Image: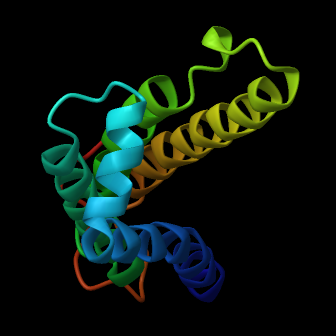
Amino acid sequence: MDVVVLIGRILFAALFLGSAFGHLTQADTMAGYAQSKGVPAAKVAVLGSGVLLLLGGLSVLLGIWADLGSLLLLIFLVPTAVLMHPYWHETDPQVKQGEMVNFNKDIGLAGAALMLFAFFAHTCDLGLAVTGPLFHLG
């Protein structure tokens, strides 16, 4: 079981760590895109979200308060879905479809992050983790 959870943590975290790298190394380009979507203080938002992605991804990957890391990723994913992918505002069918796919991806990943939070906070002995959970659920 420990190895399966570790592999799942690696696969889940890889997406967010790659995104964190992009947010932190291509902040100006990403800020331009965020600004075009109406995000206020776009560069600060890009850098802040990059830090959330990095901290959350590393937390889940390394098993250092992985429950908290899952919450950090949730905090990134839900606003990103709503602010960056508001498909309901689009009139072009192709653009609308692309935004809907990205919105649904972010919401689905948010659901997975929430489930991981509950799993990590409920299971005190995951093994192959640096720390136990920060939060404790039933």
Whether residue 87 can be seen here: yes
Q: List x then y, in percent, for residue 122.
A: 40, 50
Question: Does residue 138 sit above or below 55 in this rendering?
Answer: above
The image quarter in which residue 88 lies: top right
Residue at 60 percent across and 88 percent down: it is 3
Q: Which quadrant would the C terminus be assigned to in this image?
A: top left
Q: Residue at x 26, y 61 (%)?
A: 28
Q: Is residue 79 above or below residue 20?
A: above
At x 26% / y 52%, what residue is drawn?
46
Q: How many marks?
A: 0
Asked where in the image residue 67 lies, by quadrant, the reply is bottom left
Residue closest to the eye, 63 or 18 = 18
**What colouring style does the render use?**
rainbow
Query: Seen in the image, is 16 located left or right of residue 67?
Result: right
Query: Which image quadrant: the N terminus?
Result: bottom right
Residue 66 visible here: no
Q: Position of residue 92 (x, y in %)?
A: 80, 19
- Judged left or right of residue 125, residue 48 is left
Q: Position of residue 104 (x, y in %)?
A: 69, 33
Where is residue 134, by image quadrant? bottom left
Residue sitting at the far right:
93
Q: Position of residue 128 (x, y in %)?
A: 42, 89
